Amino acid sequence: MITLLQKATDLFEEEVRERLGSGNASLLESIQEARDFYVRAARTPVHPVRRMEWGAMAEIHVTSLLQGKVIESRVAHFFQGPLTGHGEFQRIVRQRLGEDLPLTPVLPSSYAEVGERWSVSAHSRDEIHDRHDCEIKAIYSVGSSS
């Protein structure tokens, strides 16, 4: 995944420079910080951590319910790192690289911990469930050596 995020960072920089030139120094600085981060992350072994951090992947068990009955149980993942919250970066990953990485925020807070639980109501009445119960089962750091 880190290699893919490095490619997405390069493509994102290319698009930013085409559209904005060097007119957005802070965004270009963020891109360089992301590039540096992903280079370090590629060399750092993955290891479990207790709390969500920059460069971490959360494993979340999601149980979908309809009128109190379990309809589906699945495992979802969420990665939090440089540029991953930027809509255009997510678009590049999906459209230009054809990947479906878990970059959309799903946690109740950016510093969620293993064991944390929450519920989310269905988005519309057309869905086949009325609630999702979620629990963070594990968090793995892919970008720090702590």
Image (spheres, rainbow, N blue to C red):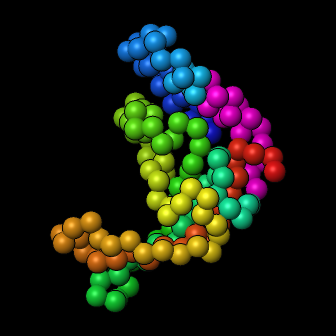
Image location of residue 86, percent across then percent down:
45, 37
Q: Quadrant of residue 68?
A: bottom left
Q: Quadrant of residue 40?
A: top right
- In the rendered image, is residue 98 in sight? no
Image location of residue 45, percent across then percent down:
78, 47
Q: Is residue 139 left or right of residue 106?
A: right
**Dominant SS in magenta:** helix
Task: Say above or below: 97 vs 116.
Answer: above
Q: Is residue 74 left or right of residue 126?
A: right
- In the rendered image, is residue 142 in sight? yes
Image location of residue 39, percent across then percent down:
70, 31
Residue shown at the point (29%, 76%) measured from the top left = 129
Q: Which quarter of the rendering shows the N terminus?
A: top right
Label total for image: 0
Task: Say above or below: 107 vs 85.
Answer: below
Q: Which residues are magenta?
A: 32-47
Seen from this angle, which residue lies furthest right?
146
Q: Nearer the viewer, residue 85 or 96?
A: 85
Q: Is residue 51 left or right of residue 107?
A: right
Task: Say above or below: 33 vs 130.
Answer: above
Q: Nearer the viewer, residue 81 or 111?
A: 111
Residue shown at the point (18%, 72%) measured from the top left = 125
**Was residue 58 drawn as part of the magenta stretch in this picture?**
no
Seen from this angle, which residue lies furthest left?
126
Residue shown at the point (74%, 51%) measured from the top left = 46
**Was residue 46 drawn as part of the magenta stretch in this picture?**
yes
Image location of residue 3, percent across then percent down:
61, 35
Seen from this angle, which residue lies furthest bottom?
68
Residue shown at the point (58%, 73%) measured from the top left = 116
